Amino acid sequence: MQKRSLKNYTLRYLVIAILGIIALWAALFYMYIIEEVYDNIDDGLKDSRLRIMREAEGNPEILRTREYDIARFKITPLPPGDYSRKSHIYNSKMYMPYDDDDEPVRVLQTIFSSGGQEYQLEIYTSTVEEDELLEDLLTALVVLYIALVVSIILINHFILRKAWMPFYRLMEQLRNYKIGGRTSLEPVAANVREFDELYGEISAMVARNEAVYTQQKQFIENASHELQTPLAIAINKLELLMGRDGLSEQNLVQIDEVNRTLQRLKRLNRSLLMLSRIENRQFRPSESIILNELVHQSLTDLEVLSKYKKTVITIDEKGDFIAEMNRDLATVLINNLLKNAIVHNAAGGILDIHISEREIVISNSGKTSLNPEQIFERFYKDEQSENSTGLGLAIVKSIIRLYPALSIDYRFEERHCFVLRKQ
Amino acid sequence: MKILIVEDEHDLIKVMKESLEKETYLVETATDFRSALDKIISFAYDCILLDIMLPGGSGLELLSEIKKLKKQEAVIIISAKDAVDDKVLGLELGADDYLAKPFHLAELNARVKSAIRRRNQNGEQHIGWRNITIDPENRTVQVDKYELVLNRKEFDLLYYFVTNPQRLITKTSIAEYVWGDHTDQADSLDFVYSQIKNLRKKLNNAGADADIQAVYGVGYKII
């Protein structure tokens, strides 16, 4: 289900509620008004009855008004009998030439006697057209309703937006929040107590998270450090053992297998240590570094490896890629990328390096795309490389994370391409 | 030659001591700051192997003490914490070298020999094995007084063997010493073989008495 914003959520219910309230109010108001109108008209009719009856005393001519005329009443003589003297008022319709239509009228009917003769007196007066009144009322109410809704929307829009501003600011900060990036949120000026509390709670949570994260990082670093000494002891004891005379070939080979496993553990531990030291920001000073030089340096260092794998290396330099970063980290960055391109390459494969002022593209032969989502994750490995630590590209990524001006991307275009870009 | 190992891990002291004694060094040990300082003040050594994290104080403090006493010992810092800062600070304080744990014993030998040789300016500056003489300062090699031309990696390789004569050096150790950290591939050990083959050929052609022997595919040994 599509979620609405709180603003629209309240608005929806307000609009419906107001519709209900206005309808109920309109019904009651209408009944009250009609009541009042009839009351007034009836008073007028009763007054007319009194005047006519009094007039009839002195002027019997009036008693002969048989039809409604300009006088708006008629008097009908009744056969003798016992009649109720009570007045009777009712609604009726009467043809009006003015409108050429039947119009609603209010009629008072009563019986009176004059000179021993019983008469029926009927007085009418034009009354409100209820349907027109209803129509008018409806129009007025629709206008009122629209006015109310529009003003509520406007108030919602402006006042609530203003009131919710601290909330949206907080949201924005949370959206951009990266763990390990910063230790506190910027304070949000809120006139609303709830937002103040929200800010307080979130700040406390961020502080707690950061503390736990720092501890975690520290733990990894300490654990890696603590592992170094036992590793050193184990490796060195094996080396001493291998140096002894009188070991059979089988024994020696077996000891060496253990030794190699420990070497792998050593490399893994070193990489982990490197990673946590990068993330703990232990590489401080930055300088302007021309990465072109590092690429050449690194290729020289990796020459044995590339010669062994018969990698065909081409370099195309269109400009100097200069980055503001720590020299050690820059070296590790370039080294890991190039080593990755040589190691995870077919024998006799291609390694192309394109350097311009804005980007360095390192591409090497490969058959299928790697998962771009996971390639920079720790311990991501493709099937063939059981001996790699799976941390080389994770180290690359964590170095890049230290420098917001740099970015690294992987794409597959017939070859594996790693693009180091400057923003 | 006397060496002092300052290290709080008894097991590690034991292996280092055994390994160095094979090279006929006289090895003494200290396991905390206080006893280390006592020994440094009271005796003269050729080389001190110094752990940074010690009970009772830091190895770096000890290093400043050594320098204050104007002692001539070569100092190699050995630390599990291969933090760049420690390394830089240690070298600035006057340490001769820095070795990160875990290390290979062959590498420790090579480093100790280099450090002692560099300290000992008036003494023998060349190291040799049989009729091979290496001048580490100028990176030159002579066989029976005749110059043997080696490339950079071959020189490093020969130097590693000559500083560890008649000792088995594993392939992983060789790969790491000569090519550094770029050797985390299984097949990387195969190129150790081709490099050693080249070196052997050159030594042979130059008429060296020494030979580099393969030990069951595990490593090599110069004899």
Image (cartoon, coloured by chain):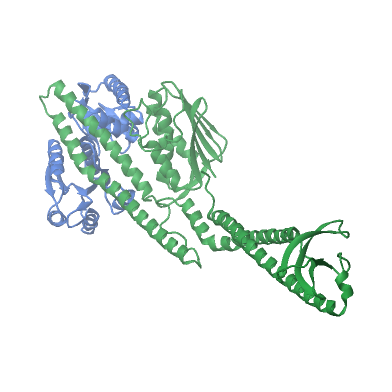
Image quarter of residue B121: top left
**Depth check, front residue: A255 or B89:** A255
Residue plotted at (15% across, 21% down):
A250
A89 relative to A47, above or below: above
Q: Is residue A225 visible?
A: yes
In the rendered image, residue A395, in percent from the top left (x then y), is placed at 39, 40
**Depth check, front residue: A253 or B64:** A253
A361 relative to B87, above or below: above
In the rendered image, residue A223, in percent from the top left (x then y), is placed at 25, 46
Q: Is residue B130 visible?
A: no
In the image: residue A186, left or right of residue A246: right
Image quarter of residue A349: top left
Tally the numbered discs: 0
Residue plotted at (23% across, 43% down):
A227
**Depth check, front residue: A240 or B75:** A240
**Depth check, front residue: B99 or B139:** B99
Chain shown in blue: B
Residue plotted at (74% across, 58% down):
A131
In the rendered image, residue A206, in percent from the top left (x then y), is placed at 39, 56
Q: Residue furthest left?
A: A246
In the image: residue A358, left or right of residue B56: right
The quadrant of the rendering that contains the C terminus of chain B is top left
Residue plotted at (41% across, 58% down):
A202
In the rendered image, residue B16, in percent from the top left (x then y), is placed at 16, 40
The quadrant of the rendering that contains the N terminus of chain B is top left
A95 relative to A113, above or below: above
Chain shown in green: A
Image quarter of residue B27: top left
